[in-house]
Amino acid sequence: MPELAGALHYNADELFPIAEVLQLLRFAELKGGDIRLLPAANRYALADVDERKQLFAQHLLSFVPLVAHIRRVLDDRPTHTAPARRFRDLSLIHI
């Protein structure tokens, strides 16, 4: 990551949160201070805007349980709405 940080004119510490999110979404793997892009990241980079949106949504729903839960709750309701406080309370538990 230090080489990437230098190329982007960032401090390596500034890139770490981004790298963690990429790992959480299974777009990258962190190991020993190095970041390796996974095949999904390559697909994302080569995709058009609509394909990127679909891939990001798919990974968000698959790898972030709170997001999947919110989606299920909204899908189960005829109005596809729910009080925001319901999810705010849950988000505090998952932080």
Image (cartoon, rainbow, N blue to C red):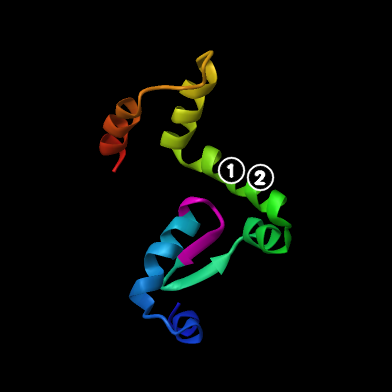
User: Which image quadrant for residue 18?
Assistant: bottom left
Image quadrant holding the N terminus, namely: bottom left
Residue drawn at the location 31% of the way across and 31% of the way down: 90
Asked which secondary structure carries label 1, the reply is helix
**In this view, 37 is above or below 72:** below
**In this view, 12 is above or below 60:** below
Residue drawn at the location 59% of the way across and 48% of the way down: 56
Q: Which mark is residue 54?
A: 2
User: Which image quadrant for residue 31?
Assistant: bottom left
Residue drawn at the location 51% of the way across and 61% of the way down: 29
Q: Position of residue 12 (x, y in %)?
A: 38, 78
Could you say which is closer to the camera, residue 29 or residue 56?
56
Asked which secondary structure carries label 2, the reply is helix
Is residue 32 left or right of 88 when viewed as pictured? right
Marks counted in the figure total 2
Q: Amino acid at mark 1?
A: Ala
Identify the residue position indicated by label 1 in the image. 57
Q: Which residues are magenta?
A: 24-30
Q: Position of residue 88 (x, y in %)?
A: 30, 33
Q: CA distance from mark 2 to mark 1?
A: 5 Å
Q: Are marks 2 and 1 in contact (CB under 8 Å)?
A: yes
